[in-house]
Image: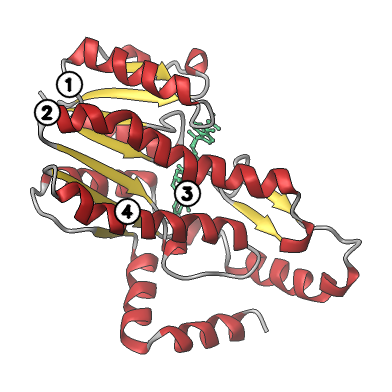
């Protein structure tokens, strides 16, 4: 039986992936910051709910070791834990900037380091990093988030070559807008209305966002992303990138076919 370790399995995409892989008969190491709160995933025998805070390195090594002890090995690492942030860059505190990278970039890198010796010893393994359409193109007021997801994209694409030498594959999932806690409790805002020069821009942004932004009717379900992750984990190919959601597919197509500047002009018009 195959085993997957998932970070950020307490909600959204991570939880949907934990359910999906378990339903398909996989062993699941469902890692989350506060496992004591989990009541659903703990009910299945082949799901091990355990603690990983990707800001705390020791929790990664411990959870990986306990997972290997319980299930024998890890076949797939799903680096999913992450959160969004939104605001005016000048208003972001040093702590907010640091934390966005600590969780979304350094957490993912450290988690990768925690399983690589195991994958090398097994002479195989697969690392799936949850990026975003926001790792391919950028929207206004999400500079920190895009910086982090662009970093994940470059990191993963380079590892693709390096780890192929060890028979370890890496893949990227690029979801569009997904109905999770991402835009709600998980989002870190850093608008500051005392920076009055930005008020007009910020108001326009909020108005456009309210109109078309996180409209639940347009968002895909986390189950759809879980299916794409499952496909990436089982298709036996070396494909690097997997878009998830019709919006992500359309935007990637637009960028590929019309070019960078056309996308920038379209987004500029939306927020004009
Ligand atoms: N939703 C979207 O529209 C969307 C689109 C593209 C990409 N993504 C990406 O998808 C991934 C999952 O997000 P989601 O949409 O499922 O949102 P979510 O429901 O808010 O889930 C985020 C998960 O990350 C966890 N997390 C946050 N900080 C952590 C830390 N320091 N250590 C360990 N876990 C931590 C959260 O744990 P707690 O429950 O403890 O807070 C939660 O389990 C993220 O990488 C996000 O960037 C989301």
Q: Which residue is mark 2?
A: 122
Label 1: which residue?
73
- Residue sitting at x 14%, y 27%: 121
| Disc on the earlier residue, 4 or 3 | 4
Quadrant of image for the C terminus? bottom right
Residue 98 seen from this side: yes
Q: Residue at x 66, y 72 (%)?
A: 208
Where 16 sits versus 236, above or below?
above
**Cα distance in 3D space between marks 2 and 4:** 21 Å
Q: Is residue 79 left or right of residue 179?
A: left
Residue contact between numbered discs 4 and 1, judged by CB atoms under 8 Å: no
Of residues 119 and 243, the one nearer the viewer is 119
Instruction: Check if mark 2's residue and mark 1's residue have beta carbons within 8 Å.
Output: yes
Dot 2 or dot 1: first in sequence order is 1
Q: What residue sits right under mark 4 in the picture?
A: 156
Q: Is residue 184 above or below residue 192?
A: above
Residue closer to the observer: 17 or 62: 62
């Amino acid at each position: 039986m195959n085993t997957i370790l998932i970070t950020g399995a307490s909600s959204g995409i991570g939880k949907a992936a934990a359910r999906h892989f378990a339903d398909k008969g996989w062993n699941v190491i469902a890692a989350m910051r506060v496992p004591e709160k989990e009541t659903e995933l703990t009910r299945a025998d082949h799901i091990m709910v355990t603690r990983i805070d990707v800001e705390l390195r020791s929790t990664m090594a411990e959870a990986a070791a306990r997972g290997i002890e319980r299930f024998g090995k890890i076949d797939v690492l799903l680096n999913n834990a992450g959160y969004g942030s939104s605001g005016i860059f000048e208003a972001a505190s040093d702590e907010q900037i640091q934390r966005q990278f600590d969780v979304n970039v350094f957490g993912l890198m450290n988690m990768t380091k925690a399983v690589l010796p195991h994958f090398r010893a097994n002479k195989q393994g697969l690392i799936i990093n949850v990026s975003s359409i926001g790792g391919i193109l950028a929207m206004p007021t999400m500079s920190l988030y895009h910086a982090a997801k662009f970093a994940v994209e470059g990191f993963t694409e380079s590892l693709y070559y390096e780890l192929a030498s060890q028979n370890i594959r890496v893949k990227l999932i690029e979801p569009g807008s997904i109905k999770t806690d991402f835009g709600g409790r998980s989002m870190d805002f850093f608008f500051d209305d005392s920076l009055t020069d930005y008020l007009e821009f910020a108001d326009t942004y909020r108005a456009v966002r309210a109109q078309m932004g996180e409209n639940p009717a347009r968002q895909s379900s986390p189950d759809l992303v879980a299916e794409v992750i499952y496909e990436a984990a089982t298709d036996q190919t070396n494909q690097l990138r997997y878009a998830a959601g019709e919006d992500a597919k359309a935007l990637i197509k637009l960028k590929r076919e019309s070019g960078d500047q056309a996308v920038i002009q379209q987004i500029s018009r939306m927020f004009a």
